[in-house]
Image (spheres, rainbow, N blue to C red):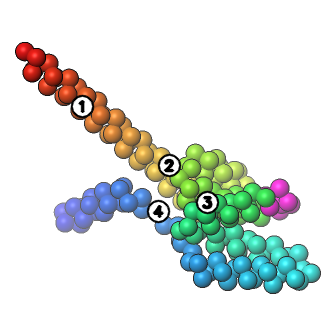
Amino acid sequence: MEAKVSQFFESVANFFSGGDHIPWSTPDVILGCEREVAEALKDDSDERKSESIMRLSWALVHSKQPEDVQRGMAMLEASLANDNSPLQKREKLYLLAVGYYRSSEYSRCRELLDQCLEIAPDWRQAVTLKKTVEDRITKDGVIGIGITATAVGLLVGGIAAALARKN
């Protein structure tokens, strides 16, 4: 019984906190990736450049700073057209979806995850993030309904109080 009560309170806490399990990057990680990109740009290896840019994109979309997330998303969108490999496209779409999730653009995030899952239907990371996004959309809808119901209740209560004073 105690375990069920604990589980209930944990689910309520996750409902209000968001409860996602996406990692965060730090400014130090981003700085290290930026240095790596700068060094790779001096190199002749396109593969090294591409890998270092992917690492920087990952660090940026996992940042707590919205401007970093936006920068990472811009980098990913710019490089998405250059993909020949389905695996690279899947990775970039997923990272872009993480960026949209971090930016609270859940519908666009879900669209990108659907594209990822067309490429790799059983990809656990994409499936997990899609469930998190759908839960967030549901939660936002429930909260919106609650706010609307409260506003309507206050309005009706105010009208009833005004009518009661008149009489």
Tell me if residue 72 can be seen: yes
Write down the residue under mark 2. 134
Image quarter (top left, top right, bottom left or bottom right) of the C terminus: top left
Q: How crowded is mark 2: few (under 14 residues within 10 Å), some or many (20 or more)?
A: some
Percent coordinates x, y for residue 101 in the rendering: 56, 56
Give the mark toward the camera: 1 or 3. 1
Kindly identify the amino acid type of the residue bearing the numbered disc 1: Gly
Image quarter (top left, top right, bottom left or bottom right) of the N terminus: bottom left
Percent coordinates x, y for residue 24 in the rendering: 54, 72
Q: Distance between the residues labelled 2 and 3?
A: 16 Å
Q: Residues within 10 Å of mark 4 (few under 14, many from 20)?
A: some
- Dot 3: element: helix
Pointer 1 or 4: first along the chain: 4
- Dot 2: element: helix
Percent coordinates x, y for residue 145 in the rendering: 36, 37
Q: How far apart are marks 4 and 2 (CA)?
A: 12 Å
Write down the residue under mark 3. 99
Q: Between 165 and 29, which is closer to the camera in this rendering?
A: 165
Write down the residue under mark 4. 20
Pointer 2 or 1: first along the chain: 2
Per the rendered image, the range of residues in magenta is 79-87
Residue lying furthest top in this view?
167
Pointer 4 or 2: first along the chain: 4
